[in-house]
Amino acid sequence: MNSKDLAKKGTLKVLARTGDAVEFAARPAIRRVRKLGFPYRAPTVPKGIVIEPKEDRLGANFETGWARTPVARGFRRVFLAGPVTAAVRVIASPRVYGVDRLSDLARLEEPIPVIFCPNHHSHLDTPLMATVIPQPWRNKVVTAAAADYFFNTRTKGALAALSLNAIPIDREATGRKSAEQIRNLIDTGWSLVIYPEGGRSPDGWGQEWKGGAAYIASRTQTPLIPVFIDGTGSIFGKGAKKLRPGRTRIVFGAPIWPEEDENIRTLGSRLQKAVELLADEVSTDYWDSRLRRKEKATPKLTGPEYNGWRRQWLLSEMRQTGDTGLRRRQKRRWPDIG
């Protein structure tokens, strides 16, 4: 055994003796604590009695009702109109289109709640939507946020609820508790922002849409508002390490009303096609996008059926059209009307 091994062995002996000494010195204090009863220690449970586990207060069970009290709403209104709006303008330079498509609903004497359904590429989408949603819905809207991400700790959940009026919702399926909460909010006049994709795009293309938005609309007979957000993925997409300020474009579509006896799958398909039409309108123009819709040739949000570099190559090519982010001005072609 060399000198290094002897030194290591000696060090271990010293640490072991130190641990024994600390344990020996702490024994009297440990005995005193053990003798203390309630309320210094949890009460004992008689044998044969089964105590039900405490209800989990995180995730989908996170309570957010306090975030809709007058005080919280007043704070949020000032917070969104000031720091959040200023930050969004500096980072994203948003331009909003299609608000006139909601004018019929906005002019009602008693505006009805609606469900805004945008695509989802970035955490920037939520503060962006909070600042561009038109009146009369902007000051009375809640945002459905992933329960397992935004409400997995009390601090994160409280910040999301207070700043963005977020409510927890399961990603995979709208649970009964979440559905009842949303239904009660809609019944009391609150509108909703929900991302039908269920999460941010991992590669810049869209994902398959889930049925949560269509389910809620069908059960509450609330109109769906298709929304296409363009440019946030380039600014701060999933996996990005830093912000890359750029320009964004938000396009609102015409309301989609659930039809009588329409199943959820059909309603969800109509909603997805409406957002795909808005995406085509952004990357080209209104006229060409409607021609492609007539020919049933509107590009899908999910992109081509390729893998790997080909999808990325086509994505970069698509981003060179239109006028958002780092894009060139597209040449307009006027229709030939004879």
Image: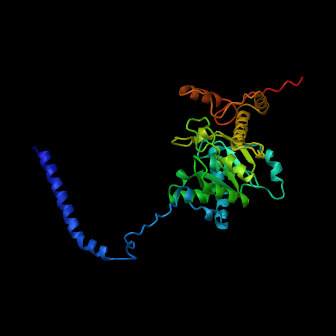
Q: Could you say which is closer to the camera, residue 38 or residue 103?
A: 38
Point out residue 261 in the picture as x, y percentages from the top left corner: 76, 46
Point out residue 222 in the picture as x, y percentages from the top left corner: 74, 51
Instruction: Tell me if 141 is positioned left or right of 3 in this view.
Output: right
Q: Is residue 311 above or below residue 116?
A: above
Q: Residue at x 55, y 38 (%)?
A: 202
* Picture quarter with the C terminus: top right
Residue furthest left in the image? 1
Point out residue 135 in the picture as x, y percentages from the top left corner: 76, 54
Q: Residue at x 58, y 47 (%)?
A: 171
Q: How is the image coloured?
A: rainbow
Point out residue 121 in the picture as x, y percentages from the top left corner: 60, 41
* Picture quarter with the N terminus: top left
Q: Could you say which is closer to the camera, residue 321 or residue 86?
A: 321
Q: Residue at x 64, y 64 (%)?
A: 72
Instruction: Tell me if 99 is positioned left or right of 90 in this view.
Output: right
Quarter holding residue 157: bottom right
Instruction: Tell me if 31 is positioned left or right of 263 in this view.
Output: left
Residue furthest top in the image? 338
Q: Residue at x 72, y 28 (%)?
A: 297
Q: Is residue 113 above or below residue 38?
A: above
Quarter holding residue 244: top right
